[in-house]
Image: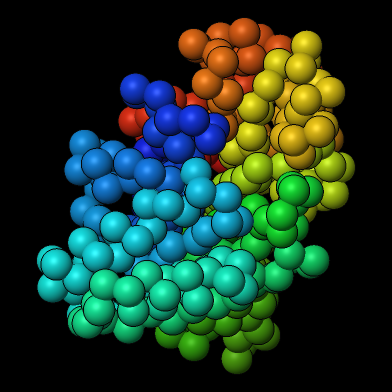
Amino acid sequence: MRFEVHILGCGAALPLPGRNPTAQVVNVHEKQFLLDCGEGTQIALRHSRIRMMRIDHICISHLHGDHYFGLFGLLSTFNLLGRTRALKVYGPPALEGLVKAHEAANETVRGYPIDFKVTNTDAPEVLFEDGTVTLESFPVKHRIPTTGFLLREQPKEPGVKREWVRKHALELTEILALKRGEDVVRSDGTTVAFADACHAPPAPRSYAFAADTRYWEKVAEAVDGVDLLYHEATFGHQMKERATKTFHSTAAQAGRIAAKAGVGQLVIGHISARYEGAEELVEEARTKFANTIAAHDGLVITVNHKC
């Protein structure tokens, strides 16, 4: 099943040609989650293979414009395209009021409901959960209240080996017990051991999005062990003081968080417009965490299990 991250925008506050403000779509088993919605998100969606009407969850990390100014247009487009299915929107307390004020000003009659969920900027919490995926938020350290987001596959049941089903003529109740991790004691006194009869399921994959944040070791705790981490790296180490002052991170600091968290791979983004390319920042991050790549608009990353 697919678990992919589609980078729609990876720039900082000032948009550049080819580098939109922050936005990305995460596809987990064909459920699509939009993380942040900066300017240009709709155009980026049009250039991608993503069907925007299949986005049912929008997560806004904080209310700096480069992370949500594209939301109003996207909600309007949903309406123009005749959406009727409910949309879930997660974000800071003021977000719902901003959306409603915008709609009131232009007398929007929306044809679909929006379920607003206020995010907690003081502690991690589960925002959404079903049989295949959980969506969580966690606090980061920025100038205004901000969260990151974390998506995890739900654990899969172990599979019973077909040869064991045939060899032992296992009944349905016995198969279900084995899938629950139980040994089966049969009427003749023999035991079918779970460890022998079942394939171990693959570990659930996970992806964390650390939005605008100053270097903060609690972020490493929140994203501990994830397979893929996106962490902002607005500046290089020469601008460490500015990074601290503006509540942003350097590339080396992003690498330190990835190393402390023991993640599988790091992708850095939210690159300042002062950098024409990201090569310098990637090399800096790799001094702390070798398996680092840079985001770029249009990049699609498959979330793989850690090696």
Which residue reaches farthest bottom?
A: 187
User: Position of 84 compared to 215: left or right?
Assistant: left
- When asked about the image quadrant of residue 257, the answer is top right
Above or below: residue 222 compared with residue 6: below
Residue 271 position, x and y percent, is: 56, 25
| Residue 202 seen anywhere in this rendered image of the structure | yes
- The residue lying at 63 percent from left, 80 percent from top is 184
State how the image is colored.
rainbow
| Residue 206 seen anywhere in this rendered image of the structure | no
Residue 250 position, x and y percent, is: 73, 24
- The residue lying at 60 percent from left, 91 percent from top is 187
Residue 55 position, x and y percent, is: 32, 62
Above or below: residue 240 compared with residue 90: above
User: Position of 166 compared to 236: left or right?
Assistant: left
Residue 35 position, x and y percent, is: 48, 53
User: For this rendering, which residue is in front, 94 or 162?
Assistant: 94
- The residue lying at 40 percent from left, 24 percent from top is 16
